[in-house]
Amino acid sequence: MKLSVFILLLSICSGCGSTPVSNQWATVTQPAKTGNSAQSIGTYTAGCLRSAASLPPNGTGYQLMRLSRERYYGHPDLIRFIENLAQTTAIQYRSVLLIGDLGQPRGGPMLNGHRSHQTGLDVDIWYLLSQTAATRNLGFDERETWSSPSVLAAKSDAIDNSQWSLAHEKVLEAAARMPEVERIFVHPSVKRLLCTRKTAHDWLRKIRPWWGHDDHFHVRLKCPKNNNDCHGQEPIPEGDGCDASLAWWFSAEAKAEALAPKKPAPRPLLPPQCDAVLNE
Ligand SMILES: [Zn+2]
């Protein structure tokens, strides 16, 4: 690193009590275990995780994908959530959830792929409810090379009915009804579809439209009890979200924003407690 860059990083950080982010978070291979209980520390986009648990590669109603990435660590609440949702999926819909990224062994920023997923409270779940995976455990290579098809018809924001089913809606509803779930990110078209259903809409508030998310949905849990250094997000607005705020996602302005080159994410400054987690 050039000295000037190093000094700049130090100056960005002076007084904040936090270390500049390095890629050490992505190379550490074991959870930090000191302390009695798992602790999510900081925010979803600038935080870390102590005493993470790991999700086994297979369980009732789910299989873990992309094993080589080793992003299968999370707060024990997240592991329990996945196992519970998968049980429901298996029993009620005879389907298997394919699980994408959770977080790294000690949480923290990743080198690629996500800005969030830093406190062990986020998980990506594929929309693909595979019949193959319902009959056998997928092999390592299948888990590396399979991808989840988009639920959108090509180059449009219409749902592709060949990739969608009532089970998808029920799985999203089951997840959103779980009290530990804070919000779920889906493609705006998925939210729009759910808004047209004549069902009770109280749970729909947690389903939030966001860029991408047409081949997976992203579940985010609330800060667990007694995780006092965990900082949640601003509350979800009142109402079920089937309003002008949803219509915006289909506006010319939103589409232009989606195509605009993305600014690099600012380097997150982690809370000082994360220094101990990383250096343990
Ligand atoms: Zn995600």
Image (spheres, rainbow, N blue to C red):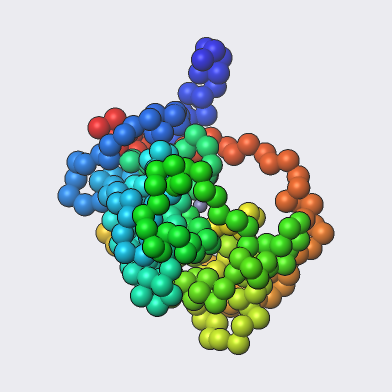
- For the image, the number of numbered tags is 0
Q: In this view, does 85 lie above or below 240?
A: above
Residue with the most extreme left position: 36
What is the quadrant of the C terminus in the image?
top left
In the image, what residue occupies the spot 34% across and 69% down?
A: 87
Asked which quadrant contains residue 141, the reply is: top left
| Horizontal side, residue 125 vs residue 259: left or right | left
- Residue 229's spot in the image, x, y percent? 34, 51
- Residue 72's spot in the image, x, y percent? 36, 47
Residue with the most extreme right position: 252
- Residue 274's spot in the image, x, y percent? 34, 38
Asked which quadrant contains residue 150, the reply is: bottom right
| Horizontal side, residue 141 vs residue 275: left or right | right
| Horizontal side, residue 250 vs residue 147: left or right | right
Q: In this view, does 61 lie above or below 20?
A: below
Q: Is residue 45 visible?
A: no
In the image, what residue occupies the spot 27% across and 40% down?
A: 31
Q: Observer-nearest residue: 71 or 184?
A: 71
In the image, what residue occupies the spot 41% across and 33% down?
A: 26
Q: Observer-nearest residue: 194 or 3?
A: 194
In the image, what residue occupies the spot 37% across and 70% down?
A: 90
- Residue 134's spot in the image, x, y percent? 41, 64
Q: Can residue 154 be seen in this view?
A: yes
Q: Observer-nearest residue: 23 or 5?
A: 23
